[in-house]
Amino acid sequence: MALQTNHPVLGPRALNRATLARQLLLSPAQTGVEEAVGHLLGLQAQNTKPPYYALAARLDGFRPERLSALMESRAVARIVTMRSTVHTHTARDAGALRALVQPGAIDRELAVFVSRGGLDGVDLARLAALARELVEERPRTPKELREELLKEWPDADPQSLSVAARCLLPLVQVTPRGLWGRGAQVALTTTGTWFPDGADQAADLDETVLRYLGAFGPASVKDMQTWCGLTRLGEAFERLRPRLLVFGSERGTELFDLPDAPRPDEDTPAPPRFLPEFDNLLLSHADRTRVVPAENRSRTWTGNQAHRVFLVDGFLAGLWFLDETKERTTMRIEPFAAPGRAVRTELAAEAERTLRIMAPEGVPYEIVFRATPDD
């Protein structure tokens, strides 16, 4: 959308502070865990621990057991949604957001596997019906699901069959998978089976735009499309334009926002925060310069694996790693540039706060700074 010259312009620092406020990262929020998961429209959960670390960075008094309890009570669950990746969602959002984003990255992923020929001769409607019958009879691991589907289509590619089932059906990863301190294989059933009041009716698009802005705004149409994997959302933003404020970015992009959403002064203090790999703060905008300086963008990934990152003054400033044994937990902090004494002290304090929450009880922990080329 072309920028109107009369729109106030928000620079990267103003966008940074607004986004951090929506993301509960300026100061630990006194918000319930379920409420926070809903406000954030889910937490990236490609690995099992990131949702816990995401909440530890955001919530005052968070304990990992609180998220585990919500998972066991089926108030939240793990399911493939935005960008065809696993997220932890509330029961309200799991099926609704999955249905909304289905025509985007999820259907595109299925199309890729179809185009590769691994599903030649497979009736996808029949596959969906059979897979539903199997996982609703009892939760099945992907291996078990593949083996059963291969009985029907012995010449098909086994991985393609299980991916197709995951793309065609809203499949929840049932507990104990994802519980804090407990390992378990992925086992799947449908949202309608897992949630007592499960419903798979798609979330209202206009309402989801408003919720996205509340969690990630101010934002452009392309920003939201990046977050959810859908395209052609311009019409929804146009319908909502009379209800929204419109700003401009320094790059000439229209940025939409809720009138009553927080937009702190760009000089508002932003304490250090330690974020997990794949945190949605870093994945939910087409233009990530509001958090990721251009010179650091390529430093957060190795291959297709994201690293854990930390923020200084609201912006990406380095990586952190955990070495966990039965005897000790070590957090290794690797800044991109040598921090000053005050910043180093703040980083150490936030690292200790994180480890007090997340390190196993009774296991000592330590914090180690890795020297930078500037040291």
Image (cartoon, rainbow, N blue to C red):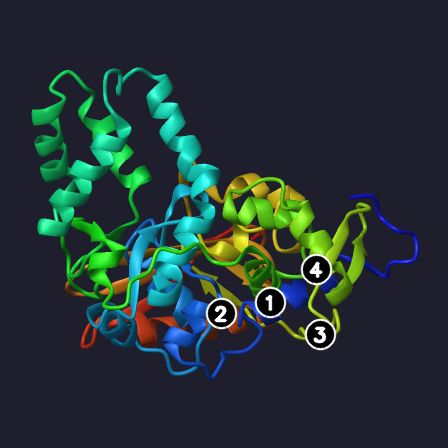
Q: Nearer the viewer, residue 45 or 348?
A: 45
Q: Which mark is residue 240?
A: 4
Left or right of 183 in this view: 63: right
| Residue behind mark 1 | 214
Label 4 crowd bin: few (<14), some (14–19), many (20+), radius 10 Å: some
Label 3 crowd bin: few (<14), some (14–19), many (20+), radius 10 Å: some
**Residue 164 occupies which quadrant of the picture?**
top left
Q: Is residue 192 above or below residue 30?
A: above
Distance, label 4 to label 3, CA atoms, is 23 Å
Q: Nearer the viewer, mark 2 or mark 4?
A: 4
Q: Is residue 116 above or below residue 248?
A: above
Label 2 crowd bin: few (<14), some (14–19), many (20+), radius 10 Å: some
Secondary structure beneath dot 2 equals helix
Residue 110 image position (x, y, % from top left)? 36, 30
**Residue 302 occupies which quadrant of the picture?**
top left
Quarter of the image with the N terminus in it: top right
Residue 269 image position (x, y, % from top left)? 66, 75
| Residue behind mark 3 | 264
Distance, label 1 to label 4, CA atoms, is 14 Å
Left or right of 43 in this view: 174: left
**Disc 2 + disc 1, Cβ < 8 Å:** yes
Distance, label 2 to label 4, CA atoms, is 20 Å
Residue 95 image position (x, y, % from top left)? 35, 56
Q: At label 4, which amino acid type do we have?
A: Leu
Whichever of labels 3 and 2 marks the residue nearer the N terminus, that label is 2
Q: Nearer the viewer, mark 3 or mark 1?
A: 1
| Residue behind mark 2 | 39
What residue is shown at x 7% (from left), y 26% (from top)? 151
Q: Nearer the viewer, residue 57 or 178?
A: 178
Whichever of labels 3 and 1 marks the residue nearer the N terminus, that label is 1
Whichever of labels 4 and 3 marks the residue nearer the N terminus, that label is 4
**Disc 3 + disc 1, Cβ < 8 Å:** no
